[in-house]
Image (cartoon, rainbow, N blue to C red):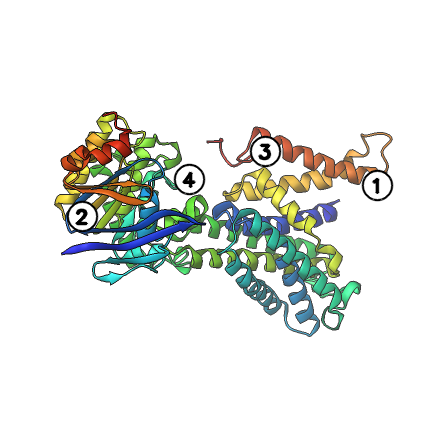
């Protein structure tokens, strides 16, 4: 059964079709890779799926629910989360606080409870803190737990973003260029983590220019060009497709 | 001299209260509120008018805080759609609108003539002692607000305010709706300004619309930015430092020969301006806001 369904989604900027009639499906437990030149509409597609730039036409369904018009925070609460191409860490918060800010804690976050914290609220907060610490362990970030996130390296910020969305126990994660500006050792590490999370039942869509890593990670791939889907299928087949080579690499490879 | 210092101290603490309110809005949440004086004015007039109707002063103070806070609701809702410079322009315009409304609606506010003869806090204790008592109560209130701010900063609520200040869109991508938090913090800061206004009204005992010009807003901003926004000690020490500048330059005229009283007032502003430039150049996080990152 497909977890995410994107049907004929178009997103306009003025008269320019950044995303043009794109349809795709994502199965539970699947890792879908998206490649394509700069300006092909990959990030805009993410923004349409996650709600930052809602689709102008078309339909998006997640876990059987129509989410085409939902605001971003409602989509995130359903378990559909994203990271950003340029890391958007909360720079004045520590790494641990970044994760805590993402945790679902509606009671504890009420204004009155800033002054009067009941025991159960404190316990809940402590549970969340432990969960955040577990995720930091998992992502190898425990060492920088109390460092302001603004001071981290680019690769570490990417991991913090991943850690933040994991606090929501998501069902589907959209990763926008998780390897950009990340050193090769850390790329392998991120790949390992993604595989591990996928093994726990989380589906991924990954936008990436680093084709070798993307090919190794993805079960299925899509290549976009000028807002449309150019090719779709098994990673090897897709990357060997002459149209893809023409559009993506200028026919050089 | 004691009486003078006490009066200066009261005004300084009133600025501290305003700065602490702005610190919640701007220091933590990065909401650019250029209308601080509007909520200060509404607090002063609410409390002043109610006290003239014979309401006991504590009730007037509560009403001042509540009404100023409520008045911030529409502005807070606006802040959901406007950011940074746009919000700054709207709040600045709002504060002038409030001042002119107070000036024009004389059936309610006595217009440009203002409200003379407001009851002074602790008036029964005699002139000297009442100022001391006001100072003590204000110091207690400011201390309480400092404690509350620290508490709030460390709470999950405060964590979200800082996250909104850093990157609102990223927070909404994490399942949080920033709207409620922004409106609440706007109202909270405004309520503090309202209470500050009530203290002002019942200390000065004579308020007019001309006391609530945008310059007050910018004094509060100067104090906060010089001290270091986002921290309690920045808001506190910045406001005190500003007071030292504004009042201290009165004495400086004894050492600066050939400058008239009027010239000195301009020099005073120039000195504040220069200090602000130097601080933003060399200590962009403020004097007490920690090292620049």
Question: Can you tell which mark lies on residue B262?
Answer: 1
Marks 2 & 4 on one chain: yes
Seen from the viewer's position, the closer of residues A203 and B29 is: A203
Question: 10 Å neighbourhood of mark 1: few (<14), some, or many (≥20)?
Answer: few
Question: Can you tell which mark lies on residue A202?
Answer: 2
Identify the chain of the residue marked 4, using the numbered disc in the image.
Answer: A
Q: Point out the image quarter for the N terminus of chain A.
A: bottom left
Identify the chain of the residue marked 1, using the numbered disc in the image.
Answer: B
Can the viewer see residue A122 in this picture?
Answer: no
Say which element carries label 2.
loop
Question: 10 Å neighbourhood of mark 4: few (<14), some, or many (≥20)?
Answer: many
Residue A105 shown left or right of residue B113 in the figure: left
Contact check, label 4 and label 3, Cβ < 8 Å? no
What is the spatial separation of the Cα atoms under label 2 and label 4, in whole angstroms? Answer: 30 Å
Q: Point out the tag, 2 or 4, that comes first from the N-terminus.
A: 4
Say which element carries label 4.
loop
Identify the chain of the residue marked 2, using the numbered disc in the image.
Answer: A
In the rendered image, which residue does mark 4 sit on?
A: A92
Contact check, label 1 and label 2, Cβ < 8 Å? no
Identify the chain of the residue marked 3, using the numbered disc in the image.
Answer: B
Residue occupying image coordinates x 34% and y 60%: A70
Say which element carries label 3.
helix
Marks 1 & 2 on one chain: no
Q: How many marks?
A: 4
Seen from the viewer's position, the closer of residues B188 and A222 is: A222
Frontmost of labels 4 and 1 is 4
Frontmost of labels 3 and 1 is 3
Residue occupying image coordinates x 64% and y 50%: B217
């Amino acid at each position: 059964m497909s977890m995410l369904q994107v049907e004929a989604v178009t997103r306009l900027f003025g008269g320019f079709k950044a995303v043009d009639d794109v349809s795709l499906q994502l199965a539970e437990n699947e890792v879908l890779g998206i490649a394509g030149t700069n300006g092909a509409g990959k990030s805009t597609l993410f923004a349409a799926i996650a709600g930052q730039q809602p689709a102008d036409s078309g339909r998006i369904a997640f876990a059987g629910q129509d989410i085409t018009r939902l605001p971003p925070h409602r989509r995130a609460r359903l378990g559909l989360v994203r990271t950003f191409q340029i890391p958007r860490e909360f720079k004045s918060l520590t790494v641990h606080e970044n994760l805590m800010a993402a945790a679902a804690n509606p009671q504890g976050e009420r204004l009155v409870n800033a002054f009067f914290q009941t025991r159960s609220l404190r316990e809940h907060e402590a549970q969340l803190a432990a969960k955040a610490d577990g995720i930091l362990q998992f992502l190898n970030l425990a060492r920088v737990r109390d460092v302001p996130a603004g001071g981290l390296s680019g690769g570490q910020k990417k991991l913090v973003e991943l850690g933040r969305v994991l606090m929501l126990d998501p069902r589907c994660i959209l990763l926008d260029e998780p390897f950009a500006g990340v050193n090769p050792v850390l790329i392998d590490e991120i790949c390992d983590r993604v595989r591990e999370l996928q093994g726990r039942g989380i589906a991924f869509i990954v936008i990436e220019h680093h084709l070798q890593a993307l090919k190794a990670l993805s079960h299925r791939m899509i290549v976009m060009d000028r807002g449309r889907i150019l090719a779709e299928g098994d990673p090897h087949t897709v990357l060997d497709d002459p149209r893809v080579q023409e559009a993506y690499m200028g026919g050089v490879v | 001299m004691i009486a003078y210092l006490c009066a200066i101290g009261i005004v300084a603490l009133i600025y501290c209260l305003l700065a602490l309110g702005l610190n919640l809005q701007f220091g933590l949440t990065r909401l650019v509120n250029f209308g601080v004086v509007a909520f200060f004015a509404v607090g002063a007039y609410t409390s002043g008018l109610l006290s003239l109707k014979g309401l006991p002063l504590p009730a007037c103070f509560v009403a001042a805080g509540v009404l100023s806070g409520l008045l911030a609701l529409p502005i807070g809702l606006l802040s959901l759609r406007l950011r940074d410079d746009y919000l700054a322009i709207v709040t600045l315009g709002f504060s002038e609108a409030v001042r002119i409304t107070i000036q024009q609606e004389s059936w309610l506010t006595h217009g440009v003539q203002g409200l003379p003869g407001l009851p002074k806090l602790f008036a029964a204790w005699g002139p000297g002692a009442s100022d001391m008592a006001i100072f003590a109560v204000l110091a207690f209130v400011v201390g309480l607000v400092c404690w509350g701010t620290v508490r709030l900063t460390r709470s999950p609520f405060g964590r979200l305010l800082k996250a909104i200040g850093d990157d609102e869109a990223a927070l909404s991508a994490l399942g949080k709706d920033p709207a409620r938090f922004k409106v609440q913090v706007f109202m909270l800061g405004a309520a503090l300004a309202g209470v500050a206004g009530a203290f002002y009204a019942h200390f000065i005992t004579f308020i007019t619309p001309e006391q609530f010009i945008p310059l007050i807003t910018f004094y509060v901003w100067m104090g906060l930015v010089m001290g270091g926004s986002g921290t309690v000690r920045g808001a506190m020490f910045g406001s005190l430092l500003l007071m030292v500048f504004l009042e201290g330059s009165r004495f400086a005229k004894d050492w600066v020969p050939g400058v008239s009283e009027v010239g000195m007032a301009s020099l005073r502003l120039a000195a504040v301006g220069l200090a602000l430039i130097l601080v933003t150049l060399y200590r962009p996080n403020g004097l007490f806001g920690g090292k620049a990152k």
